[in-house]
Amino acid sequence: MQQTADLSMKTETIIQEQPLAHRMLTGILKRGSVSPAYLFTGTEGLGKLAMAKWFARALFCNQSQTAGEPCETCSVCRQVQAGVHPDLHLIEPQSQGGSISIGQVRDDIRPAVARRTYQGQGKILVVPQAHLLTVQAQNALLKTLEDPQGESSLILISSQPESLLPTVRSRCVRVPFKSLSLEAYARRLEKMGVDDPQRQRDLYETTAADVQLASHLAKEDTAQWELMEKVAERLLRSSLPPPMISEIADRLGSKREEIKRALAYLLVLLRKRLLKEGNWREFASCVNAVSGTIEAIDANANIRLTLEVCLVQLQSSLYRKYN
Ligand SMILES: [Zn+2]
């Protein structure tokens, strides 16, 4: 979950990795022009929730020596960091994997907005996974946004902002969180125990710089990654005899998401060599095979059969050049 990823990150790291978001927010604090609603966007694991809490600390802290920055040591800062400050409200689904219902907007968000601030420095309401708001909940939320009560600021956080209603999005000041540079990404991977620079670069490409995905991959069975490396090597050297195809399909198992990620990784491995050698046509054919397979897996096709077809197609795309 996003929160877990955020909690393991230091605020300084996030500020360093997201200078644009940080500059926007300090500018707002220095001008004292806090808006009724913000939308923090960007892939999972970039520290959006941690930055929202940092913003709350910077807003509530009364010991700060620098405008727009929290002191990070006073009791207010510590309460916000621990998530127990009475002017900071986190709105999350009531059950894991559930959505945020209209009932929660009525029972949690509206009363929180209406309540007086405890400390008098405003209130911050954070919805860490705003895309989990149902359409009815978003519509109910709109009423709150249309009628801001001055003291509250709502921070919607989402890696899928397009799933929010345009009317909700248009009422928020957007704070974009940028994808990590390869350097920052590699530093994160090192903390997850992935220290091979080549593997770091491959993961950066495979996941399109998505750290959350990389953290899943780093935890995931590395056997699948090694298997894909062997398959790529074999496809680019000789051929896959039918018993080998069958064995690979067996070892890839039946977990759809894992298989899709493994195939995307295989494609990255093939791309490197094929494009380097100018074999564009072969690469296009591999892309077709893999994307067709991913579509079929998404459409609930028989996984085993689909994988075998995919491997045969990859082999026939490469056979003439690499055998
Ligand atoms: Zn403080």
Image (spheres, helix red, strand yellow):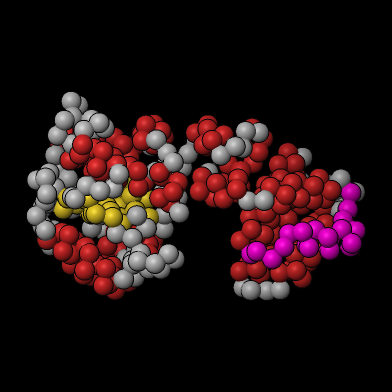
Q: Nearer the viewer, residue 54 or 275?
A: 54
Q: Nearer the viewer, residue 286 or 17?
A: 17
- Tell which residue pokes out farthest to the top in this image: 65
Image: 73 above or below 243:
above
Residue 66 inside the magenta-drawn segment: no
Residue 186 visible to an observer of this rendering:
no
Residue 215 visible to an observer of this rendering:
yes
Tell me which residue sits at (9%, 45%) in the image: 120
Q: Nearer the viewer, residue 266 or 113?
A: 113
Q: Nearer the viewer, residue 161 or 66?
A: 66
- Span highlighted in magenta in the image: 238-256
Residue 245 inside the magenta-drawn segment: yes
Magenta segment main secondary structure: helix
Spot occupied by residue 3 in the image (x, y as percentages of width and height): 40, 50
Spot occupied by residue 314 in the image (x, y as percentages of width and height): 78, 57
Spot occupied by residue 246 in the image (x, y as percentages of width and height): 84, 63
Tell me which residue sits at (18%, 50%) in the image: 87
- Number of callouts: 0
221 vs 170, left or right, is right
Tell me which residue sits at (73%, 38%) in the image: 276
Image: 310 above or below 208:
below
189 vs 31, left or right, is right
165 vs 45, left or right, is left
Tell me which residue sits at (45%, 54%) in the image: 1
Spot occupied by residue 265 in the image (x, y as percentages of width and height): 67, 50
